[in-house]
Image (cartoon, rainbow, N blue to C red):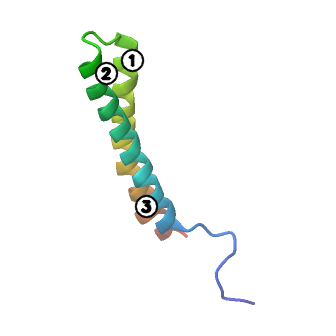
Amino acid sequence: MSHGRNPRSLDHARIAKTGFLAGLGLFAAGVVGELAGHSVVSSMPETLASALLILEVLGVAVAFFMPLIFGAVLPLME
């Protein structure tokens, strides 16, 4: 019986860091898109403004929950 690492186990730290950076990227894309859209076009279409707002909200949610889930909860359950 081997007590080594399970080859199928997840690298929780890497997933948490990558998820945080992905969320940060989504948030940054939403903010930059909204700022650039308002500076280039005086009246940005509502669908584009809504999509950029969704990017910002989704980015904050991903950046918050990925480290919480993969950095704290799942390693304790393994």
Q: CA distance from mark 1 to mark 2?
A: 9 Å
Give above or below for 49 relative to 66. above
**Three-letter code for the amino acid on which mark 3 is drawn:** Lys
Which residue occupies 38% across, 28% down? Answer: 54
View extreme (front): residue: 40
**Three-letter code for the amino acid on which mark 1 is drawn:** Leu
Tell me whether circle 1 and circle 2 mark residues in contact (CB < 8 Å). Answer: yes
Query: Mark 3 sits on what residue?
Result: 17
Q: CA distance from mark 1 to mark 3?
A: 29 Å
The image quadrant of residue 47 is top left
**In front of the other: 33 or 20:** 33
Q: Quadrant of the N terminus?
A: bottom right
Q: Please tell me whether mark 2 sits on a helix, a strand or a loop.
A: helix
Q: CA distance from mark 2 to mark 3?
A: 30 Å
Q: Please tell me whether mark 3 sits on a helix, a strand or a loop.
A: helix
Which residue occupies 31% across, 13% down? Answer: 44
Q: Quadrant of the C terminus?
A: bottom right
Give above or below for 29 relative to 24. above
Which comes before the other along the chain, label 2 or label 3? Answer: 3
Which comes before the other along the chain, label 1 or label 2? Answer: 2
Q: Position of residue 50 (x, y in %)?
A: 36, 19
The image quadrant of residue 28 is top left
Residue 37 marker: 2
The image quadrant of residue 16 is bottom left
**Three-letter code for the amino acid on which mark 2 is drawn:** Gly
Query: Mark 1 sits on what residue?
Result: 48
Tell me whether circle 2 and circle 3 mark residues in contact (CB < 8 Å). Answer: no
Q: Residues within 10 Å of mark 3 (few under 14, many from 20)?
A: some
Left of 71 or right of it: where is 5? right
Q: Position of residue 23 (x, y in %)?
A: 40, 46
